Image (cartoon, rainbow, N blue to C red):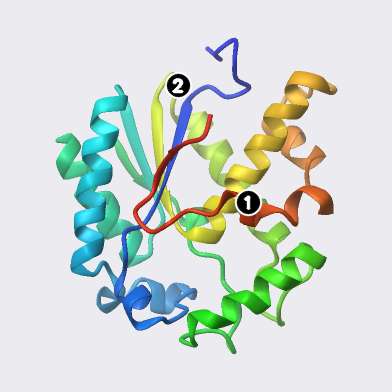
Amino acid sequence: MKSTTSFLCNKYWVLRHGKSIPNEKCLIVSSMENGTCPEYELASKGVNQALLAGQLFLKAIEDVRICYSPFSRTTHTARVVASVLNIPFEGPQCKVIEDLRERYFGPSFELMSHDRYLEIWALDEKDPFMRAEEGGESVDDVVSRLTRAMAAMEAQFQGCTILVVSHGDPLQILQTILNAVQQQTETGPIWNDLESKIQAVRISPILSQHRNFALLTGELRAVI
């Protein structure tokens, strides 16, 4: 049953993965091929961040589910948090969702310096429907798969607190659309299904501002 204060069946928190080896090396690792490599999981500081996030989350929630990106750094983070919460990582309370993966920026950005994020975010602000290069994902492309991820979580879980463990850009974008939908639900037309609600806010003035919801590595935040 949906809460009277939310358009969703569950409560959602987001957690950006802890500081990773790519973060330490200042590398962009956004492809599925590279992102799932064990050598790109968490650095020691990131493990400590994940432990702290799990301890903070433990104080705030009950009936928790963890949904996470398949990349090694997010899987590692989710595993550490699950251990703190005493949840079997291989059990039904933890679910890998491919649509929560990192935003793919394109082949010429892959394994390049983090400094190049600034090029992408500048383009996002001008046109969130434009890809930085052929093969990469625009903000709106990410919204498409986040919509699928949200629909999957809403269909599978009811009345739970869901911790979404993902990456900087996807979590910024997820917060952007959920915040916009919440505002529209309170003041605008009522849509019956989640996909229609999100579709209504897939407009440039909203999507171009996703950097307003930026997260630090290992940062935990209640969303809705």
Q: Nearer the viewer, residue 184 or 90?
A: 184
Does residue 53 appear to the left or right of 114 in the view shown?
left
Q: How crowded is mark 1: few (under 14 residues within 10 Å), some or many (20 or more)?
A: few
The residue depicted at 20 percent of the width and 48 percent of the height is 51
Expressed as whole percent of the image width and height from the top left, the position of residue 27 reads 43, 82
Question: Label 2 amino acid?
Answer: Gln
Is the residue under label 1 in contact with that under label 2 (CB below 8 Å)? no
Q: In this view, does 222 lie to the left or right of 183?
A: left
Q: Which mark is residue 212?
A: 1
Give the residue type at disc 1: Asn
Residue at 34 percent of width and 54 percent of height: 218
Q: In this view, does 48 lie to the left or right of 184?
A: left
Residue 35 spot, x, y in % from top left:
40, 73
> Badge 2: few (under 14), some or many (20 or more) residues near its Cα, within 10 Å?
some
Q: Distance between the residues labelled 2 and 1?
A: 29 Å
Q: List x then y, in percent, for residue 173.
A: 62, 52
Residue 93 visible, this orientation? yes
**Which of the two marks, 2 or 1, is nearer to us in this view?**
1
* Residue ID for mark 2: 158
Q: From the top left corner, tell me how far across and down residue 1 is, in percent.
A: 52, 12
